Image: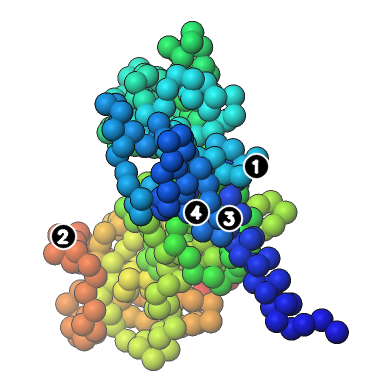
Amino acid sequence: MSDPIEEDFATMFEASTKAKRIEKGQTIEGKIVAIGPEVAFIDVGGKGEATIGIDELKDDNGNLEVAVGERIHAVVVSTEGGLTLSRKLARGAATLRQLEDAFHSRLPVEGRVERAVKGGYEVRIARQRAFCPISQMDTIRADASAHEGRVYQFRIVEFKEGGRNLVVSRRALLEEEQRASAAEVRRSIVVGAVITGRVTSVREFGAFVDLGGGVQGLLHVSEMGWSRVSDSSSVVKPGDEITVKVLRVDEDKQKISLGLKQLTADPWSSVQATYEVGQVRTGRVTRVAEFGAFVELEPGIEALAHASTFAATRGSQGWSAGVTAGMTGAFEIVSIDAEKKRIGVALVPEGSARAAATEDFEPEDAATDAAPAEAFGSLADKLRGALKPREK
C-alpha cells in the first residue's frame, strides 16, 4: 500500500514542475543568489538555479551593475543542461554576435522604436539600427506616431551584411502569443458570456472586436443600441475597450456574434406597463417608407404610422409629400403587440384637444426639431381612420 505522504509530495512536485515550465526565448525574472568570476547564479523558482555570464551584468565601463539579492529580468537562451540566461537580449544591449545567435535561434530581442520612416519604422537594437516594416509592427493598424519611443520585443527576420542590415518583426511574436492563447480564449467564449474586448475596426455594418488571442467577434450595428443606430462610428471607435455579450457562436465558420445593447434593459419589456391604446404621445419621425412612417416614441421604442393614416395629396409623392425624417408631433397609440415589438400610431391633428393631452415624453434634441414639427400642421387634415397592423 502506497504512502499517502509520498503520493501528496509526488502530486505537488508534478504540479509545481508543470506550473513552472520554462522555454527557450521566454523572458523570466529571478533573484541573484551568487556572483562568481565568470557566471552568476539566479534563483528562478521551481526550476532551481539558472546561470548568466558575468559580462551580462556589467556596464560599458566593466563595472557590475547588480549585487546579490537583487532581482533581474533575462531571456532564456538555452535549456540544455540547465537554464542559461541573457540579460543583454532583454535589455537591448546585445553584441553583434549575440544578435546573430538570436537570429539563428529565433530568440526575441529588445528594441526601441526611434521614429517612423517610409514604409515602416527605424528601431534601435543595442548599437545597431534595424528596420521594421509597417505591416510587421502590430497585428492591427494604428497611427504611426503611436509606436515612436516605445520599447518592444522583436524577432530578427533578416541578418545581412554582418549585422549592418537588420529587419525585425514584432508582429511575429504577437501572433505566436495569440495562437498560444487562442484555444484558451475560445473555451471561454460561450453564448451568454459577458466579456471585454478591444475594437479593431469599424465598418458601415458594425465593428470587429478582438476578444483576446487574435479571436475576433462581430458587433453588428443592429446590436449596438435599442434605438436605431445609423452610424457605427458614433458608438465605438478603433482602440476602444468595450464589454459585450456573446449572442451566437458558429464553430464551423469560426464566427462569433456580439451584442452591446443586451447589457442594458430592453425598453420593450415595460411597454405593457407604460403604454396603452388611446394614449397620445410626442413622437419623432425617424424614416419614411413606401408603406408608412416610423416614429420614435422614446429611445428604443419605434412605432409605425401606416400610410393609411394619412389622406392622399396631389402629386406623385402622395401622402408622403409633407412627411420627412426629423418631424415631431402628437401621435395616438392605436395598437400594441408587445410580443412582436409592434406599436401602431396615428398622427393627431395639431391644435386639437387630443394633441393637448400629449404624454410628457420629449424626444432627444427636441429643440433642434422644433422647426420641422411645425410642418405637421399642414398634415392635420390628413388623419383618417385607425392603424391596422400590416403583416410582413
In primary-sequence order, the first of circles 1 and 4 is 4
Q: Which residue is mark 3?
A: 47
Q: Is residue 309 above or below residue 148?
A: below
The residue mark sitting in front, 4 or 2, is 4
What label does residue 368 carry, if any? 2
Residue at 28 percent across and 33 percent down: it is 63
The residue mark sitting in front, 2 or 1, is 1
Q: Which residue is mark 1?
A: 81
Residue 115: percent from left, percent from top: 29, 25
| SS at badge 2 | loop
| SS at badge 3 | loop
Marks 3 and 1 sit apart, C-alpha to C-alpha, by 12 Å
What label does residue 44 carry, if any? 4
Marks 3 and 4 sit apart, C-alpha to C-alpha, by 6 Å
Residue 319 visible in image? no
Q: Are marks 2 and 3 in contact (CB under 8 Å)?
A: no
In primary-sequence order, the first of circles 2 and 3 is 3
Identify the residue at the far top of this view.
161
Q: Amino acid at mark 1?
A: Gly
In primary-sequence order, the first of circles 3 and 1 is 3
The residue mark sitting in front, 1 or 4, is 1
Identify the residue at the far front of this view.
37
The residue mark sitting in front, 2 or 3, is 3
Disc tally is 4
Q: Is residue 73 above or below residue 169?
A: below
Q: Nearer the viewer, residue 196 or 379?
A: 196
Q: Amino acid at mark 3?
A: Lys
Q: Are marks 3 and 4 in contact (CB under 8 Å)?
A: yes
Q: How packed is label 2: few (under 14 Cα within 10 Å), some, or many (20 or more)?
A: few
Q: Are marks 4 and 2 in contact (CB under 8 Å)?
A: no
